[in-house]
């Protein structure tokens, strides 16, 4: 039964492949951004193309295109970081120890990772990703229907509430009953 944990290995290997896909996507989006800035032609930018579809033909200014393109790059990096946390933290927690003790590249958080810490870290990473998406929406707010902005904001707030709840539960579980009673009294 204990050996069944190795059935998760293909899942983590698949996430490593997904990480490679995100690296490729980042490089493609970076190339489009460079082309757009160098040529001054927003036609190279997928952001400009989607923006033009959104606004029924209005071409955004270069600074808006660059800002939205950079936010798209940040989004890819943040999702990639989320993948690393799931791959390394999940493997370490649920499959097998990685044994990086003393290695200069060992992530600081890996030394005290457990399922609860991983959930809180994932929750805060999802909030960061959601924040980038919400910022992209706010930049384009005059062309986006109010109900879409409202729902994105509600979903973001649900992520925030969930992360706060996970952190609170982790805090409760990490203290002994005597420490919790002492904290409540003070």
Image (cartoon, rainbow, N blue to C red):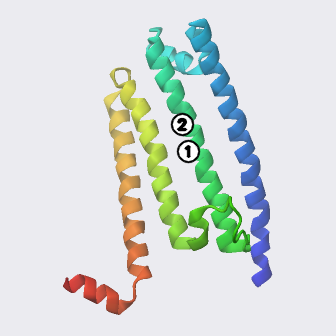
Residue 150 vs residue 91: left or right? left
Q: Quadrant of residue 11?
A: bottom right
Q: Are marks 2 and 1 in contact (CB under 8 Å)?
A: yes
**In this view, 105 is above or below 92:** above
Q: Position of residue 36 (x, y in %)?
A: 59, 13
Closest to the observer, 116 or 157: 116
Distance of label 2 from label 1 (alpha carbons) = 6 Å
Badge 2: few (under 14), some or many (20 or more) residues near its Cα, within 10 Å?
Answer: some
Residue reaching furthest bottom? Answer: 178
Instruction: Tell me the number on the disc at residue 74.
Output: 2
Relative image position of residue 119 (x, y in whole percent): 51, 65
For disc 1, the marked residue is 78
Give the number of the disc on residue 100. Answer: none
Q: Is residue 75 above or below residue 93?
A: above
Quarter of the figure that contains the N terminus: bottom right
| Residue 112 in the figure: left or right of residue 3 | left
* Residue 109 figure quarter: bottom right
Q: Which sits in the foreground, 48 or 34? A: 34
Asked if 109 appears above or below 145 in the picture, the reply is: below
Q: Residue at x 44, y 11 (%)?
A: 61
Could you tell me which residue is drawn at 35 percent across and 34 percent down? 149
Work out whether 118 lies above or below 36.
Answer: below
x and y percent of residue 29 in the render? 64, 26
Single out the residue that lies furthest toward the left: 186
> Which element carries disc 2, helix, strand or loop?
helix
Q: Is residue 123 left or right of residue 143?
A: right
Which residue lies at the image location 33% right of the left edge and 34% below the top edge?
Answer: 147
Residue drawn where x is 52% and y is 58% of the image: 122
């Amino acid at each position: 039964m204990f050996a069944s944990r190795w059935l998760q290995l293909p899942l983590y290997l698949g996430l490593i492949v997904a990480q490679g896909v995100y690296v490729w996507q980042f490089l493609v989006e970076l190339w489009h951004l460079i082309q757009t800035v160098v040529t001054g032609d927003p036609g190279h930018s997928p952001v400009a193309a989607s923006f033009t579809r959104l606004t029924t033909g209005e071409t955004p200014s270069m600074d808006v295109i660059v800002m939205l393109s950079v936010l798209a790059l940040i989004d890819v990096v943040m999702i990639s970081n989320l993948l690393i946390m799931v791959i390394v933290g999940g493997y370490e927690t649920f499959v097998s120890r990685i044994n990086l003790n003393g290695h200069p590249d060992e992530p600081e958080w890996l030394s005290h990772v457990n399922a609860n810490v991983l959930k809180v870290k994932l929750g805060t990473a999802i909030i960061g990703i959601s924040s980038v998406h919400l910022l992209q929406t706010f930049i384009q707010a005059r062309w986006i229907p109010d109900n879409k902005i409202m729902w994105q904001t509600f979903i973001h707030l649900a992520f925030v509430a969930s992360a706060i709840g996970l952190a609170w539960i982790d805090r409760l579980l990490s203290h002994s009953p005597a420490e919790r009673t002492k904290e409540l009294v003070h």
